[in-house]
Image: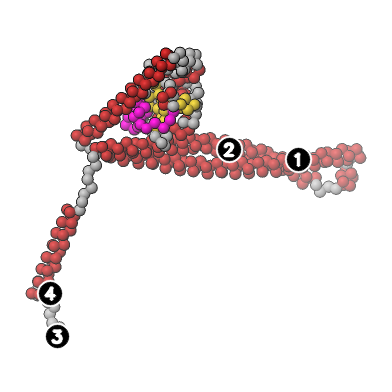
Amino acid sequence: MASHRKPRTSVLASPGGRRTAAGLTTAALASVTLLSQSADAAPRAPKPSIEEVKKKVDDLYHQAELATEKYNGAKERADEQRHTVDSLLNAAAKRAEQMNRSRHQLGMFASAQYRTGGMNPTAQLMLAKDPQQFFDRSHLMERLTGRQKQAVTDYQEQAAAAAHQRVKATDSLEQLQKSQASLKESKRSVQDKLSEARQMLSRLTAQEKARLAALERQKEAAAKRKAEEAARRQQERERQRQQTGGGSTGGQTGGGTGGGSSTGSSSSTKAEQALAFARAQIGKPYVWGATGPSSYDCSGLTQAAYKAAGVTLPRTTWDQVKVGQRVATKDLQPGDLVFFFDDISHVGMYIGGGKMIHAPHPGASVREESIYYMPIYGSVRPG
């Protein structure tokens, strides 16, 4: 049967449809144009100046060093906790061995009791060859009963001690896991800061890198001038003390480069030994978390230097600053430790003349530098 439906007419085929399509196309093109104009008109963030880049990179290095000290502290705690866990596990194993020996002895008595426990005194008397044998056997049983009681007591004590050691070992293991988690987080933080700094520097053009290097030289020159001025003031104070008959306090001469302390002083000898070690490390690279012998971070260098002199220093700057005698900047002597920034995240070893030996930051090597290159927090004299 023939269909009476009207043939469908495409909207695009009709005149009105063509006008509608044309309108839609025009509107779409207009929208694209407006979006393109909006995108072009959107304000772009201005490229940071070289001064801003330098400040940001310096700040990232500072944050990385702060994270490094956190890493050093977490690693030290993890190492100590790992040693504690090993000791506790060894102690728990020994307790378990003692408990097993007590259990074995108790089992032997239990077996003996099972074998003889069914015989009453009358039966034993009847089976004994003579009365004296019975009395000897009764005496032995009394002794065995006493030893059985002691075996039970020993087993209970060893079992309780073994359980206590297991609890201590489990708690210590949990602390170790926390320390390891903190260590992992600190490591990630250091790596993130250093990666960000490297990315900023890699985007600089050759001209911008040259400008950055020039700014760095200007900063170093300003710090050097400040160190030289401090050395001159120190020399003047020494001359005044000599003229007034006060002599040299601490033996400092030559603008603060001095001899450390009185002749034959043990602390002076140790400071000289530490300085000699530090000087021998000049040129070795800074590596965060490193304590030598091929690379160092800041507190790793000072710790290793004083270790060579027979003095034990803690691992982190936050702990090293608590060791020894606090000294003012104007009274610094060679071998003193100088700490920087309000967060005490960096340390160097004073060598005199307003200078120090330190491991600066990633990408740099152990070197001599003015103590005024960074804001000074305070100083200590290890003893």
Res 47 quadrant in image: top left
| Circles 3, 1 touching at the beta carbon (< 8 Å) | no
Foreground tag (1 vs 4)? 4
Kindly identify which residue carries mark 1.
Answer: 150
Q: Please state the horizontal and vertical placement of residue 175, each as a whole percent of the image.
A: 52, 42
Residue 301, compared with residue 84, is above or below; it is above
Foreground tag (2 vs 3)? 2
Residue at position x 44%, y 35% from top? 72
Q: Is residue 377 magenta?
A: yes
Q: Residues within 10 Å of mark 3 (few under 14, many from 20)?
A: few
Mark 4 and mark 3 lie on one chain; the one further toward the N terminus is 3
Mark 4 and mark 2 lie on one chain; the one further toward the N terminus is 4
Kindly identify which residue carries mark 2.
Answer: 88
Q: Which mark is residue 10?
A: 4
Kindly identify which residue carries mark 3.
Answer: 4
Identified by mark 3, the residue type is: His
| Circles 4, 3 touching at the beta carbon (< 8 Å) | no
Whether residue 134 is visible, yes or no, is yes
Mark 2 and mark 3 lie on one chain; the one further toward the N terminus is 3
Mark 3 and mark 1 lie on one chain; the one further toward the N terminus is 3
Foreground tag (3 vs 1)? 1
Foreground tag (4 vs 3)? 4
Pick the front one: 147 or 236: 236
Q: State which region is magenta.
A: 359-379
